[in-house]
Image (cartoon, rainbow, N blue to C red):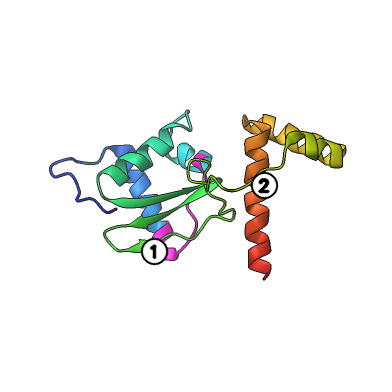
Amino acid sequence: MIREPIPGRALNKREVILMGIIRECTDAALPIPTIDDIAEKLDVANGGTVPEIFRRLADMGLIINEPFQRGRRVCLVETGKWSALPLNAAPHWRNRPKNVPAPSVVAVRARRPDIAAEIFTEAARLGKPAVEYLADLVFVGWEVEKARG
């Protein structure tokens, strides 16, 4: 949904910088940089600030923001140009279809304890429940299989 820009609302310094980053990416059809890379350019310590700025720009009708699990694709409304998809286009957990099955933690552990340990360690590192991380992996695997034909 495209919204009309909020009249009279000037962009703050960080919003201007992020709009510049978005413009560069959409003009060259490049992926949007990582949250950490953008946070560094905006001189913010908290990575949570960056998604908030993306949300504000989208609320103002300046961009269309499509979040993915590990990245985002953005359209600059003024030009209609899109950035490239991120390397991993698995849906963000908030947008993942609910009918995507996830294997049970017990089944994964029983089948391959060595790989299960790696998967659960990575889930913990990411701060995600193991079952959610397994659902992400299933979805990514399914997309790869569909692409193979």
Badge 1, how many Cα within 10 Å: few under 14, some, many 20+?
Answer: few
Q: Is residue 103 left or right of residue 114?
A: left
Determine whether the residue tagged by mark 2 lies in a helix, strand or loop.
Answer: helix
Q: Which amino acid does label 1 sit on?
A: Asp
Q: In this view, does 50 lie to the left or right of 148?
A: left
104 shown above or below 21: above
Q: Which of marks 2 and 1 is nearer the N terminus?
A: 1
* Nearer to me, 15 or 57: 57
121 shown above or below 18: above
**Cβ atoms under marks 2 and 1 closer than 8 Å:** no
Magenta span contains residue 49 = no
Q: Position of residue 53 (x, y in %)?
A: 36, 38
What residue is rendered at 62% in x and 59% in y?
143
* Nearer to me, 51 or 114: 114
Residue span colored magenta: 25-35
What residue is rendered at 65% in x and 57% in y?
142
Q: Name the residue under label 1.
A: 27
What mark, if any, has residue 137 been given in the picture? Answer: 2
Q: Is residue 37 visible?
A: yes
Q: Can residue 33 be seen in this view?
A: no
